[in-house]
Image (cartoon, rainbow, N blue to C red):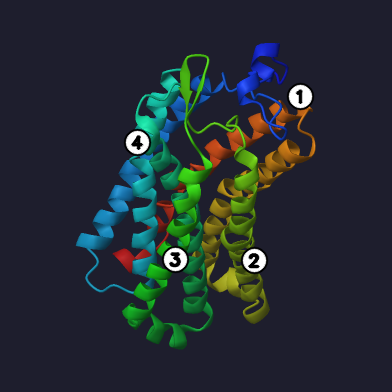
Amino acid sequence: MVSPQTSGDDVWAPDEERDDLDECWIDENFLPNVMPPVLILEFILGLLGNGFTIWVTWWHVKVWTSYTIYLFNLALTDLLFVVQLPLRVHYHMRLNDWVLGEFMCDMVVFFFYANMYGSIYFLTCISVERWQVIERPLRSLSRRRSLMRAKLVSVALWFLALVPQAGMPFIFHTFEHKNQTRCLSFNQPWLMRNFNVWNAVEMVLGFLLPFGIHAGVPRAHCATNPRLLQTRKRAAHFMIVILLIFTICFIPVHIMRSLLIAVKLLVPKNCGLHQMVAQVFYWCLLLSSCNCIMDPLILFLSGDRFR
């Protein structure tokens, strides 16, 4: 990680790009050295893993259950995310210079956050469905036959994942800086005012509520079935993997994103703090993308369901 101390030209935005809430200019020059290798790896592994998951569920699963529907939709959200990764690689390999136009920049931001919250929602459904199979097998059997209910839930979750991101074109924009066109940049003037509102909504609907459900499911296992770890080891490992995906990919980025917004709004002239928080946030943002290569692990832990 590069030092948060930068030259005056990097720390402070030009006068026409300054705002009373966006005084400090975050140095993003380290991104071209960090992003492309990781994004290329995520593209290759994510394309293979999620493509394989969709292939298995669509062509080789004869009888679909609610679990299959949620897993298929999870892989679909990841695949939609993966296909836009080459655009981000292209941007960073051009040293953060976007040449593909405003619309394509909007689409990259849209699909990034749609994937993030689509993955969170469908992981939550898979976790709850798995808990029902373990703790309430007779009841869960009838629910798994109710494909219509699972389809309706999936439609509702797609709605929750996509609709809030429809505002992204009104929040993020391309802008010119030093003869370059920036996209996906938190140096954009007046960004934090609108981004703060969006973040508050997604923190509640897309993070805190699903996290509460994820945290409650293992506790429910212990409360209703104390011998779960002895008799249902595979199920326990399955739940642990889902919780690890959530913990590694989504908790850090939500904490650091909220912290970055708070620093931008509350201490707009503390440029050293801005740079430090922003760099940690960018690393967490990169880590959050790893969910597209971790989610296919769920297929391999599904056991006899896909044999």
Looking at marks 2 and 4 on the same chain, the residue that comes earlier in the sequence is marked by 4
Residue 212 numbered mark, or none: 2
Q: Residues within 10 Å of mark 4 (few under 14, many from 20)?
A: few
Q: Given contact means CB atoms under 8 Å apart, are the residues at marks 2 and 4 in contact?
A: no
Q: Secondary structure at mark 1?
A: helix
Classify the position of the N terminus by image quarter: top right
In the displayed orientation, state which residue is furthest to the front.
Answer: 16
Q: Looking at this view, is 137 or 4 the one in front? A: 4
Q: Nearer the viewer, mark 2 or mark 1?
A: 1
Q: Position of residue 15 (x, y in %)?
A: 65, 20
Asked if residue 2 shows in the view, the reply is no
Name the residue at 60% across, 29% down. Answer: 187
Q: Position of residue 75 (x, y in %)?
A: 36, 54
Looking at marks 2 and 3 on the same chain, the residue that comes earlier in the sequence is marked by 3
Residue at mark 2 to residue at mark 4: CA–CA distance: 32 Å
Residue receiving disc 4: 44
Answer left or right for 224 relative to 171: right
Q: Residues within 10 Å of mark 2 (few under 14, many from 20)?
A: few
Looking at marks 4 and 3 on the same chain, the residue that comes earlier in the sequence is marked by 4
